[in-house]
Structures are given as C-alpha cells and as structure tokens.
Image (tube, grey):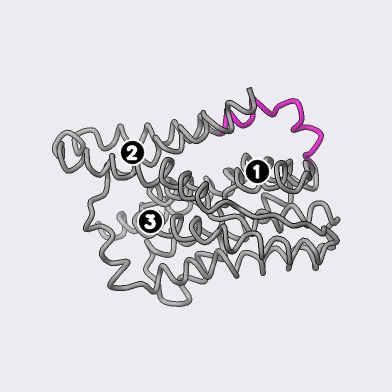
Amino acid sequence: MTLLANQVLLPLCLALIMFVMGTGLSWQSFTPLVSKPKAALLGVIAQLLLLPVIIWALILVLRLPPVIAAGLVLLACAPGGATSNLFSSLSEGDLPLSIALTAIVSLLSPLWMPWAAQMQLAWLGYEVVFKLSYKLVVLQLTLVTVLPLALGMGLRRLKTAWVERYEKQFKQLSVGLLMLMILVLISVNYQVLPSVFGLSALMVILLASLALAAGYMLARLLGLSERQSRTLSFETGVQNAGMAMMIAFSFLQAPELGMLALIYGILMNIPAFITLWIFNRKSLKSLTSAA
C-alpha cells in the first residue's frame, strides 16, 4: 500500500493539481520571466544557498543530534516541491514564477543534490556516495508538472469561457487534492509516525517556518513585488520530501533520515497553511483599505 501511495497516488494528485494550475495560465504568463529574470535568479539562490544557511544555523545553535541534522541537510538539498505551486496560486502569488523555479531547480537537482548532500553529510559523519538519473528526473518533471500544466493551458485556450465559469470550482478541487495527499501520507504511515515525533517534528516545523519567512523577507529586501515575494516564500519553505525520502531509503540505506523527510512532508503543511492565511488576510485588508 505504501509503494502504491508513493509511486501512483501522490504523483497522480500532483499531476492533477498541475493540470488545474494550468487552466489559470496562458503562454504569455511566462514572458516576464525572460524579460525580467531577477526574481527567478533570486528564487534559485534562495533554494540552493539560503535554505542550507538556515539549516546549519539550526544545527549549530541548537546542537542537534547527528541523525536529525543529517535529515534536515538532506531536505535542504532536495528541490522545491510541486505543492509550492498550489500554495503560490492560493496566496495570489506569481504562479508562472513558481512553476519556473520548480522546473529549474528540479533540472539542476541531478547535478546539485548529490554533490551538496554528500559534502554536507560528510561534515556530520555520514560518508555516502550516490548519483541521480537525469533521465528519471526529467521524466518525472514531464509527467507530473510539464505535461499536466500544458494540458490545462490547452483546455483554457480551447474552452476559455467554460474554464472561467468554473474557475472557483477548479481552485476548490486543487485544495481538495492537496488535503487528499496529506491524508494518504498519514494513512499509509500511521503505524510508524508516533515513534518519530518529538524533537524531529518540532525541527521540521521550525525549519519550514523559518524558510517561509526568510524567503519572503529576502525577496522584499531586494525589491521584488508582493506577489513575487509570496512565491519565493513558498518556493523556499516547501521542499520535495518525496525525493529526500527516495534518496534516504533507496540510495543511502538510511531509513532514519527518510522518516524525518516523511514527517516534513506531512507537518510542513501546518506553517504553509498559516503563511497562506497571513497572506490572504493581508490581501483582504488591502482590498478593504482601497474601498
């Protein structure tokens, strides 16, 4: 059941979410990324450099046990998760920027992740060597992100009036799919979850909270718009827990690290939803003030 959930149900939910996201976009939505690449460049820097800085600050200041520290390092080396696109959309962020960052960092992951993870894990006493298949990463990115997104955009182009009529229902569907993913993760792992809560749970919530805040503040300090800053918040704070789990279980033979990634995949939604609520409340206040 766990294998079915991880390899079929969760990717299918992600693909459906990306299809729904695509119905709100056109090809012209991505042109600002080419003409004004500052936000995309800053987003990549935030994921590859800012997140590890946050991790190591936690490790050194709190003197975390090596197992928890190694699990957090592995998470920081993973690319951003596709659910960041949904949170960006729901917060009225820059969705094309979010999708572009997910794609860019995912494509960099076969080169970046093994090098960064092996170097940092060695500092913690984990001598590991592994490689990622570039073809596998591209295939996963295509099936889960690019193809569903293109189909959604195609549906909008062919049936614009119909898509706009049901836009609210599409957004509700995407939220429902996210909740389904969380429930699936909990249901197939409920037997082992109690044994790994405690300090690990506290650390993943703290990590996600700090990363969400740091991504937003960095973007605002460097002059990005409110929409772009919200997107960078979620791109920095929502990591691909599934890839971190795969590396831990399949390549490193370190289930203790994989379990921390699993906890993150579930609990990072708590600070993510709180951040979403704060952003939407801020938008509501702006509309009220303007009126």
Q: Which of marks 1 and 2 precedes in the sequence?
A: 2
Mark sitting on residue 258: none
Circle 1 residues within 10 Å: few <14, some 14–19, many ≥20: some
Q: CA distance from mark 2 to mark 3?
A: 16 Å
Pointer 1: what residue?
246
Q: CA distance from mark 3 to mark 1?
A: 30 Å
What is the three-letter code of the residue carrying label 1?
Met
Residue 46, placed above or below residue 192? below
Residue 93, placed above or below residue 198? below
In the rendered image, the residue lying farthest to the top is: 1
Mark 2 element type: helix
Q: Main secondary structure of the magenta part?
A: helix
What is the three-letter code of the residue carrying label 3?
Gly
Mark 2 or 3, closer to the camera: 2
Mark 3 element type: loop
Q: Which of marks 3 and 2 precedes in the sequence?
A: 2
Residue 236 place in picture, x, y as percent = 54, 60
Tell me the magenta residue range. 182-197
Where on the picture, by quarter, is residue 144? top left
What is the three-letter code of the residue carrying label 2?
Val
Q: Is residue 147 left or right of residue 249?
A: left
Residue 25 place in picture, x, y as percent = 26, 49
* Residue nearer the viewer, 64 or 281: 64
Mark 2 or 1, closer to the camera: 1
Mark 3 or 1, closer to the camera: 1
Residue 161, placed above or below residue 225? above
How many labels sit on residues? 3
Q: Is residue 126 left or right of residue 180?
A: right
Q: Which of marks 1 and 3 precedes in the sequence?
A: 3
Q: Residue at x 15, y 39 (%)?
A: 158
Pointer 2: what residue?
20
Mark sitting on residue 93: 3
